[in-house]
C-alpha cells in the first residue's frame, strides 16, 4: 500500500511527522522504510523495528540510502526488549497502531524506552468522527478489511490510547486521501505527545 499512498500525497504528511526530530529515535512498524528519507539531519540514529520479513528486507535496502544512520531489526511493538529503559529521545509510529495486536501494550513499551520528556510522533488512521462511518468501520473490521490490509483495524480509538500514557502537545485531524467516496480508513491524526517527567 506504500506506493499507492505515496501517489496520493502521503509524503507531505511523513515530512510533517518527522520535521524537527533530533537525537536517538525508535520507529516501530517501519514497514518498507518509506519514512527513512524524511528523517532530518539532527537525528543521530534510528532503530527501525519491523516484524514482517519481506517488509524488513525492503526497509534494509531503504536504510542504505537514508540521510541518517538507520538500523533495521526484527521485533514487535508490544515487546521492545532490544531497547533499554529511557534510551530514546523520540519514538515514531506511522500507520502502525491500527495493526498491532495490542496498541496499549505497544504504547506502554514506547513510553518505557523514551526518556522523560521524550516525544512520541504519530501519524495514524483512527476511529471516524461520524456515527455512520463508525458503523461502517465496525462492519468492515468484522469482515474482509483485516484480511486485505494485513490486520488493520480501521475503528481504533488511537487518540485515547495515546492520551492514556502521554501528554498530548499537538494533533491535526484530517481526511486522507481526499476522495469522493468516503473510506473507512480516511480519518487520520498527526501529532506529537510527550512522555511525562
Image: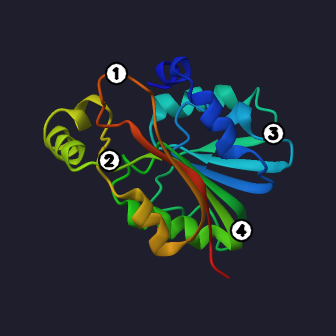
Residue at the disc numbered 1: 180
Residue lying at 35% horizontally and 60% vertically, measured from the top left? 102
Note whether 136 is above or below 105 in the view shown.
Answer: above
Q: Circle 1 sits in a helix, a strand or a loop, which is it?
A: loop
Mark 1–mark 4 distance (CA, rounded to whole Å): 44 Å
Indicate left or right for 104 with 7 as reference: left
Residue at the disc numbered 3: 68
Residue at the disc numbered 2: 128
| Mark 3 or 2, closer to the camera | 2
Q: Confirm whether residue 122 shows in the render.
A: no
Q: Are marks 4 and 3 in contact (CB under 8 Å)?
A: no
Residue 138: x %, y % from top left? 18, 46
The residue furthest bottom is 197
Residue 141: x %, y % from top left? 20, 42
Residue at the disc numbered 4: 87
Residue 196: x %, y % from top left? 63, 79
Q: Please state which of residues 36 and 80 is positioned toward the viewer in this rendering.
A: 36
Amino acid at each position: 500500500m506504500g506506493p499507492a499512498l505515496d501517489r496520493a500525497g502521503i509524503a507531505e504528511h511523513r515530512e510533517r511527522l518527522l520535521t524537527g526530530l533530533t537525537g536517538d529515535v525508535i520507529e516501530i512498524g517501519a514497514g518498507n522504510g518509506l519514512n527513512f528519507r524524511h528523517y532530518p539531519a539532527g537525528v543521530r540514529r534510528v532503530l527501525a523495528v519491523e516484524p514482517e520479513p519481506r517488509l524488513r528486507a525492503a526497509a534494509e535496502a531503504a536504510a542504505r540510502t537514508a540521510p541518517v544512520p538507520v538500523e533495521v531489526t526484527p521485533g514487535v511493538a508490544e515487546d521492545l526488549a532490544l531497547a533499554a529503559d529511557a534510551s530514546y529521545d523520540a519514538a515514531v509510529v506511522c500507520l502502525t497502531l491500527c495493526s498491532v495486536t495490542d496498541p496499549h501494550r505497544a504504547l506502554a513499551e514506547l513510553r518505557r524506552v523514551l526518556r522523560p520528556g521524550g516525544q512520541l510522533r504519530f501519524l495514524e488512521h483512527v476511529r471516524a468522527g461520524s456515527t455512520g462511518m463508525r458503523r461502517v468501520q465496525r462492519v468492515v473490521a468484522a469482515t474482509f478489511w483485516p484480511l486485505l490490509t494485513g490486520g488493520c483495524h480501521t475503528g481504533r480509538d488511537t487518540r485515547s490510547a495515546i492520551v492514556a500514557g502521554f501528554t498530548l502537545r499537538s494533533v491535526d485531524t484530517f481526511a486522507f486521501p481526499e476522495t469522493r467516496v468516503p473510506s473507512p480508513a480516511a480519518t487520520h491524526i498527526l501529532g506529537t505527545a510527550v512522555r511525562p517527567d
